Amino acid sequence: MQQLCSPIHVACTQSLGRIVDIAAGGSFCAALNEDGGVFVWGFGLLGLGPNVEKSAKPLEIPRTLFGENLFMSNSRVTGLGSGLYHLAALTSLGQLYTWGHNKGGCLGHGHLNDQFFPLKVNIGAHTIKVAAGVDHTVALCKPFT
């Protein structure tokens, strides 16, 4: 992989389907397709475990890590956010998942450990939007009704 200083067409995403959201951190990218699939590539804690720290091609994070299963088939990722070394994903059920380097507790899990897989943040409200900076994450939420 190499760094580029001018815009190019990213051909490796064509097999992912229609992309509806993207996020980029210090050395990685993420894409969300219209079916709720989250794909990551680059360097860092990509959300695929401690043994996958780089990929030149987009790899899909298993949907079960975002709560999708036989009993919750209506749960799917609807949005992405990224800090310098961490990522966040919103689901159709208003849940927030974060993973990556947990500098200063920026993942919101109540500890300082890095997170190798997406983990649900216990907010106690319906998350509408997420944004992240270098070492912090903010979420726009509304109370459960």
Image (tube, rainbow, N blue to C red):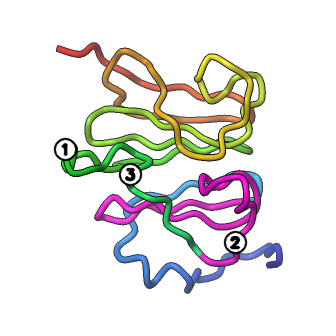
Q: Which mark is residue 55?
A: 2
Disc 1 secondary structure class: loop
Does residue 76 show up magenta in the picture?
A: no
Residue 42 at x, y = what percent?
71, 66
Q: Which of 8 and 91 is in front in this view?
A: 91
Q: Which of 21 and 144 is in front in this view?
A: 144
Left or right? Give the position of 112 relative to 40: right
Q: Mark 1 points at which residue?
A: 71
Q: Which mark is residue 143?
A: none
Total labels drawn: 3
Q: In which quarter of the image is the C terminus?
A: top left
Taking 13 as reference, is 89 above or below it?
Answer: above
| Mark 2 / mark 1, whichever is N-terminal | 2
**Amino acid identity at mark 1:** Phe
Pointer 1 with pointer 3, Cβ within 8 A? no
| Mark 1 / mark 3, whichever is N-terminal | 3
Magenta range: 28-57
Q: Which mark is residue 64?
A: 3
Numbered disc in front, either 3 or 2? 3
Q: Residues within 10 Å of mark 1 (few under 14, many from 20)?
A: few
Which residue is pictured at 55% across the width and 86% down the height? 11
Q: Residues within 10 Å of mark 3 (few under 14, many from 20)?
A: some
Does residue 47 show up magenta in the picture?
A: yes
Residue 21 at x, y = what percent?
43, 58
**Amino acid identity at mark 3:** Thr
